[in-house]
Amino acid sequence: ETGVTQSPTHLIKTRGQQVTLRCSSQSGHNTVSWYQQALGQGPQFIFQYYREEENGRGNFPPRFSGLQFPNYSSELNVNALELDDSALYLCASSWGQGGQETQYFGPGTRLLVL
Amino acid sequence: AQRVTQPEKLLSVFKGAPVELKCNYSYSGSPELFWYVQYSRQRLQLLLRHISRESIKGFTADLNKGETSFHLKKPFAQEEDSAMYYCALSPYSGGGADGLTFGKGTHLIIQP
């Protein structure tokens, strides 16, 4: 069984740029959720994708967008980067839509915006 | 909107002592509650969830709806329990997804 993987591990961007983060879900899982974890905080829900459709969204602006592919891997895109977007971005996969399924987390991508 | 509060940022106890990590939540419906743990240099992983009523690594947690709490307990702490612990809530009860709402976490240090 392959766990959740994320790429890249680290990334440095400048304000105003765009970034794409990638996630491969655990085998057998069809749902991917993305979270942002700022320093000293718990993860905060960005959105969830279920069978290639956005299934739910947290309190994040539209410049945070995503995709899910037929193999259930996913991308998180952030446009017009701001300094406050500097954080650890976590991807989690699960079987079935909704938040009550056990979610399995990847190691995260650490984004620094200068 | 739902909220999860972990009042202790840092908790330090001696090996063999009892441990209690506090978690309080606010949510008007029937939530699903979780404890996630992150050991040093490892990814976030599920420790336990209230619906399964399991004891994992000696930890238990009871959902108290009256006090809106889901405290994590272990009678005798071990050094390998040192980690970051997050309490999380899922409000989803059908249709769509709101994801997990996490507390800010408690750093548990077990002293030898």
Image (spheres, coloured by chain):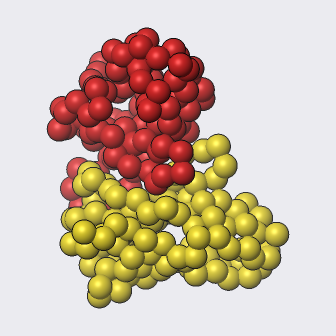
> Which residue is painted at 76% across and 69% down in the image?
A113
Give the residue at x 29% y 85%: A71
Residue B18: percent from the left, percent from the top?
Answer: 40, 13
Query: In which quadrant is the C terminus of chain A drawn?
Result: bottom right
Q: Is residue A106 visible?
A: yes
Query: How many labels were placed on the picture?
Result: 0
Give the x, y percent position of residue A86: 70, 62
Q: Quadrant of residue B24?
A: top left
Nearer to the camera, B74 or A31: B74
The chain coloured red is B
Q: Residue furthest front?
A: B112
Residue B89 visible in the displayed image: no
The residue drawn where x is 37% and y is 80% is: A73
Question: Horizontal placement of B57 versus B99: left or right?
Answer: left
Question: Which quarter of the rendered picture does the N terminus of chain A lie within?
Answer: bottom left
Quarter-wise, where is residue B60 in the image?
A: top left
Residue B90: x percent and y percent? 33, 46
At a point 27% along the width and 53% down the height, the residue shown is A102
Q: Is residue A8 above or below residue A100?
A: below
Query: Which x, y percent locates residue B10?
Result: 60, 26
Q: Which chain is yellow?
A: A
The residue most toward the bottom is A70
Is A56 located above or below residue A74 in the figure? above
